[in-house]
Amino acid sequence: MKKFIGLMLVALLVLGLAALVGCGGTKTGEVEVETEEGTTTVSGTITEKDLGVPIYPGAKMDENSAGTVKSQNEKGEEVWTAAVLWTDDSVSEVIDWYRDKLKGKPQFTDLTQGISTSATGQEMGMFAFQEGDAFKMVTIAKGTVDHLGKTEIAITSGSGPGVPPINTSQ
């Protein structure tokens, strides 16, 4: 249960990041901010390689909800990358595809069965895994705002000293 709560907190943080990056239209180039604590760079150009997670075949990336935030301080560099994609395929098809593609990844965790759909009444899938120091998460659900009626895929990746590793012990 602690692992699930921890992963949900990370998911909320990353979804907030995706919303922040998604504000204000399509992003190109980079914006850099320097403070006493360090430097933060925000970029809106994302590739499958940046995410480190396969992109569902035929899925379209929402350019307004994709980006990378890099922070450099005395603890090191922390990198968060997030993207929202959408497809006309069903939620269950996309869940099955990602489960098959990701199940062999290190510390793979399928959180789909632990998600209560009673609040929304909608099917949803969530997968997480750890590659080196990078935490990766894929969340799949029916779009409710920007891609109404479509299947949305939120992919997030985080690495660095502030990113908690997946704890496989209960």
Image (spheres, rainbow, N blue to C red):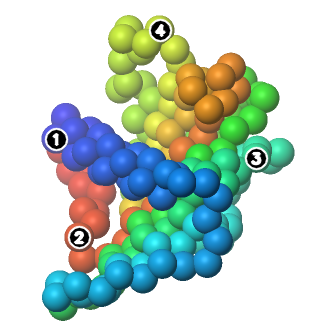
Instruction: Using the rendered view, name the quadrant where residue 41 is placed.
Output: bottom left
- 3D distance between C-alphas at marks 4 and 2: 34 Å
Which mark lies nearer to you, 4 or 3? 3
Q: Residue 27 at x, y = what percent?
A: 61, 65
Three-letter residue code for mark 3: Lys
Q: Position of residue 9 (x, y in %)?
A: 25, 45
Residue at left 16%, top 88%? 36
| Residue on which the image places disc 4 | 121
Q: Where 27 sits versus 140, above or below? A: below
Query: Could you tell me which quadrant the C terminus lies in?
Result: top left
Instruction: Tell me the kind of residue under disc 2.
Output: Gly
In x, y percent, where is residue 7?
30, 46
Front: mark 1 or 2: 2
Lower sequence index among marks 1 and 3: 1
What residue do we see at 35% from left, 81% from top?
33
Q: Using residue 121 as the reference point, say whether residue 34 is left or right of it.
A: left
Q: Secondary structure at mark 4?
A: loop
Element at label 1: helix
Nearest to the observer: residue 67 or residue 55? 67
Horizontal side of 76 relative to 147 (left or right) equals left
Cβ atoms under marks 4 and 2 closer than 8 Å: no
Q: Disc number at residue 162?
A: 2
| Label 4 vs 2, first from the N-terminus | 4
Q: CA distance from mark 2 to mark 3?
A: 30 Å
